Amino acid sequence: MLKFNDLKDKRYFNGNFIAPTLRKAGQEKLAEKIYHCSDMSDIAVCQNCGQRYFAGSFYCKSRFCSICAKLRALAWLSKLVPLLNDYMAKGYKVFMVNYTIKDQADLEVGLTALLDAWRYMTNGEKSLRRKFRELNCGGVRSVEVKIGKGSGIWHPHIHTLVLCKVAKGERVRQFEDYKELWECAVRSAFGCSKTSKKLGSVDIRGIKKGNRKSIMGAVVETFKYISKFDWLKLPPDKVNELVEKTKGRHFISAWGELYGLNKQVEELLAMTSEEELKDKVCEVCGCTEFELEHELTDKLPKDTLK
């Protein structure tokens, strides 16, 4: 659950940075939606002693909202961290595999090519699909969009966490396999020949068994947001392009042994405060009976936020 102080900080960030930036880009409707995220909060009141607990808010669910980005990361942490620990205890290895394409001036071109390449590799061309499934037995994927540091143009890329079932003591070296596979998929997406310049790249890192901090860091890196908030520094036309070209696209998915996990996370995010209170116990008196109240969430000035 999101800490109340975190909620206040992020509401301030939404209201004073994200919403104004979106308004300058002509995204008035989205700006209002995010500005009013969490305007109403649920307060659980213990029926025995009257102790009050923050029990959630009404969220906008926008991929550009700082509150909803944090909530989604927390939901993935709660679902994926214990699951990955269980798999690793059974002998599976877990890897972060990130896929990139050549930076593009047109975000529509870049996103289409990126997602087409992913589709060719995972569920399209037969030989690519077979090889991909030989390399892992399941995973989760998230797309991130940002401006390339060296190019100054759009750099869409894919973060994944994948499972690999191996025999005890077996060493796994898959970088070259993923690299070859992804390059073939990217060439297919762009319609290029084998003689053309390199169009894609792969980065792969292993997650150490039993290292909870490493696992949590990998999950957060994969799912915290569609785009780091660097987009707030972009000119209005670029912000507008980012919003319009990402609208309606599905950027998170799961496959293999983790198939359906993304739906479980969405269900967790949609859980009502009433459902969350089923197992709640008052920390003051031990009572399990609560009444839910709805209140306006104060928009506190920045210097009062701790």
Image (cartoon, helix red, strand yellow):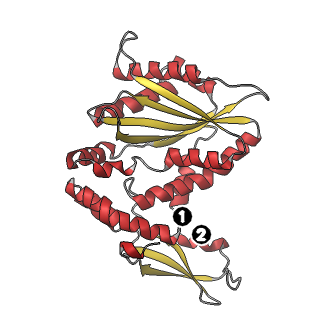
Callout 2: helix, strand or loop?
A: helix
Label 2 amino acid? Glu
In the rendered image, the vertical position of residue 232 relative to residue 181, given as above or below: below
| Dot 1 alpha-carbon crowd within 10 angstroms: few under 14, some 14 to 19, many 20 or more | few
Viewport quadrant of the N terminus? bottom right
Q: Are marks 1 and 2 in contact (CB under 8 Å)?
A: yes
Residue matched to label 2:
276
Residue matched to label 1:
271
Instruction: Farthest residue to the front: give it.
Output: 303
Residue at image coords 55%, 59%: 268
In the image, is 249 to the left or to the right of 273?
left
Label 1 amino acid? Met
The answer to whether residue 58 of the structure is visible from this angle is: no
In the rendered image, the vertical position of residue 92 relative to residue 280, given as above or below: above
Relative image position of residue 120 (x, y in whole percent): 45, 25
| Dot 2 alpha-carbon crowd within 10 angstroms: few under 14, some 14 to 19, many 20 or more | few
